[in-house]
Image (spheres, helix red, strand yellow):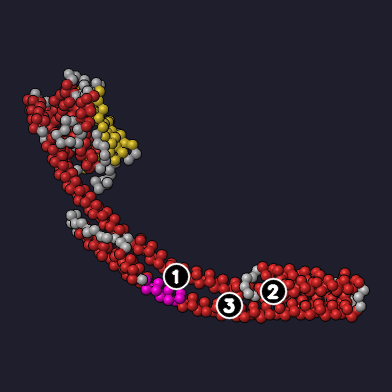
Amino acid sequence: MQRLFRRLSTVESISRRLRLSFRVLVILLVVPAIVSIAAMLSNNMRYNAIIAHMGQVGDLKPKVAVDIPDEAWSAVAGYEAFDDVRLFEMIHEVNVELDVLMGSMIGPNQLELTAARRAMDTLREKVVELGQQIEGGAPVVDNEAKLEEIRDVAALVAEMLENYIAVEIDDAIEESAALNRMMVISLLLEFALLVLALALSVYAQRGLSRAIRAPIGQLEHFAGLLAAGDLRARAPQTRVAELSNLTESFNVMAGRLEELMEQSRREQENLKKSELRALQAQINPHFLYNTLDAIVWLAESGNTDEVVHITRALSDFFRISLSQGRDWIEVAEELKHLRGYFTIQKVRYRDILDYEIDVPEEAQEGLILKLLLQPLVENAIYHGIKFRRRGGKVRVVGRREGEQLHFAVIDNGPGMTEERLLEVISSLGEEDASAGYGLSNVDRRIRLYYGIKQGLRIHSDSEGTRVEFILPVRRQASDV
């Protein structure tokens, strides 16, 4: 028993402890109960068989001791012809029942039935002799003497059956006493095993509780450290198999959280750099110098309306670029910012540049991350339209499909070779990428702010370049 308790306390798996405890309880409670029940059922079956045998023998006794002699007397007294009496039939019925009884039992009591069966054969011989005397016309005195022999043999068989019943009664009493003793012993044994099983259950429950409580306490402490912001905390390993896996998963989760927090910190730093560079790009000294130079040139030429128009466009351009520090602006504001930029560039490039903004009203609802379209237009002008002598055109197309906004900036410049296109696409999102800062910046900001895997899609051939992106519709800045 001590080895059993020691075995329960050294098992390191909760499920294995439970299985072992269950098996021990089954062995202690179920197996002895099954053995006891089987033994009592066997004893009870023997007792019932004894009772049944006594009943059958009891039924045979009057048939042998009374019925057969009376039937023989009827033939001797002349009440019935010998051929009409049922002596042989009655003897046959008794013999059949005796054979059945002897075949269904084993033991010393079978000797009484064997002797009775042989006496029945003697009785049959006496009946045959009686029939021969009656048929031969023997005197009545001789027939009566043979009848007395038949009665003596029948009485002997009845005595044997009586002896069998007496012995069977003694056996039945012994079986009943044995059954009672077995019941008492079984009850005492079951009670002792029940007490032992309860003690074992209490011991196993306390051991299991101790085995779980300490690791759970460690995990709780570890979870508290994580909640407090200590992502470097790690839970110590435990010997309990199930909790060991849980502890390892917690530690992996903590490590992953630490990596994600570091990654988020780096992304935030990159995002701030991207926003700063995007804003600096709008205040490009060359762009500002060329715009102011164009304003001066128009003023000297006396084109005051043009001066007012371009100055207002420049004012709107920078006002929307700054947008009071907001990251998200209405789609209509982004398009107004784009028109201001086109107005300023149109003055500079004149016949070389033409533009078109095709965005229906339903696509102008909601918010968009600012400064997404202008860098793409600037890239189209400086790397596409700038190299044409005339007839250059930039188209900005937008549409809404369900809960998505589709925007494309299309130019009819010379386009890119296949090798250059692959180089630009592969370098999107990288710092100082060969794709050019404008494309890389927009691609990175779309991925970071919108949390989507793909930013820009670029298509280019000899007829021009198309840069497009797809965004989820946002109705307020807090939408995810």
- Identify the residue at horizontal 33%, vertical 36% (top origin): 401
Whether the residues at callouts 2 and 3 have beta carbons within 8 Å, the answer is no
The span from disc 1 to disc 3 (Cα, nearest Å) is 26 Å
Compare residues 406 and 353 and report the one nearer the observer: 406
Q: Which mark is residue 362?
A: none
Drawn side of residue 318 relative to residue 99, left or right: left
Q: Closer to the observer: label 1 or label 3? A: 3
Compare residues 362 and 402 and report the one nearer the observer: 402
* Residue 324, visible in the rendered structure: no
Task: Report the residue marked by disc 3.
Answer: 175
Which mark sits nearer the N-terminus, 1 or 3?
A: 1
Instruction: Give the crowd class for mark 1: few <14, some 14-19, many >=20 residues within 10 Å.
Output: some
Compare residues 305 and 34 and report the one nearer the observer: 34
Looking at the rendering, in which quadrant would you find the N terminus? bottom left
Tell me which corner region of the image, top left, top right, bottom left or bottom right, holds residue 425. top left
Where are the magenta residues, as a range?
Answer: 189-200
Q: Which mark is residue 29?
A: 1
State yes or no: residue 190 in magenta: yes
Vertical comparison of 391 with 69: above or below: above
The span from disc 1 to disc 2 (Cα, nearest Å) is 44 Å
Amino acid type shown at disc 1: Leu
